[in-house]
Amino acid sequence: MNRLATYNPEITKRYDFMMESVQALGELAWNMIKAEQVFVRTKPDSTLVTNVDETLNDVFIEQADALGDIVWGEERSNAEKNNVRLAAHQWLWLIDPIDGTKGFWRSYMNKRFSENTSSIMVTGFAPGETTPTMSVIHNPFQDQEVTISAY
């Protein structure tokens, strides 16, 4: 049994969701890398975005939608961003699907990920909370993947 279950079953459910999601997103990113299906473009704000960023963001939204949760993603959202009235009644997730896109793209182009510090970052807020309930940073791109989480 997950030790969080004794604290709050809803927190346990969302924590497990968060951890399973970032693992699956990391695998999806690697599948796209191995298939050489990574492309980059410049966003209107002059920052880079890859199709991996957008795909991971969209998949996370689909997963959160199944729970009835709100996602405010760096690339896309499933609800109006900063609508705190809506967030007061539902779980809210913030996602940066690839934090460090420039480094990610450089590693992809050089075919060297061993020193890549790009990460999948997800933070969850319980309904009505204004401070994070849980968060995870997952870097599946190094030789040994690194995951740090807190709740």
Image (cartoon, rainbow, N blue to C red):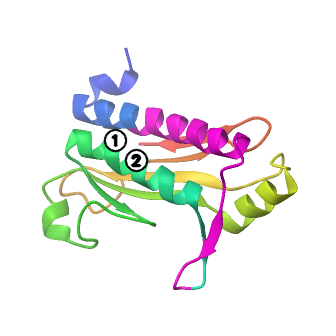
Front-most of 62 and 14?
62
- Residue 83: image location, x then y, percent: 20, 71
Q: Amino acid at mark 2?
A: Phe
Residue shown at 27%/60% (left/top)? 78
Front-most of 146 and 143?
143
- Residue 60: image location, x then y, percent: 40, 47
Q: Quadrant of the N terminus?
A: top left
Q: Which mark is residue 60?
A: 2
Residue shown at 79%/63% (left/top)? 106
Magenta residues? 18-45
- Residue 93: image location, x then y, percent: 34, 54
Report the predominant secondary structure element of the magenta stretch.
Answer: helix
Residue shown at 62%/73% (left/top)? 41
Q: Quadrant of residue 26?
A: top right
What is the tally of numbered marks visible in this picture? 2
Q: Which mark is residue 63?
A: 1
- Residue 77: image location, x then y, percent: 33, 63
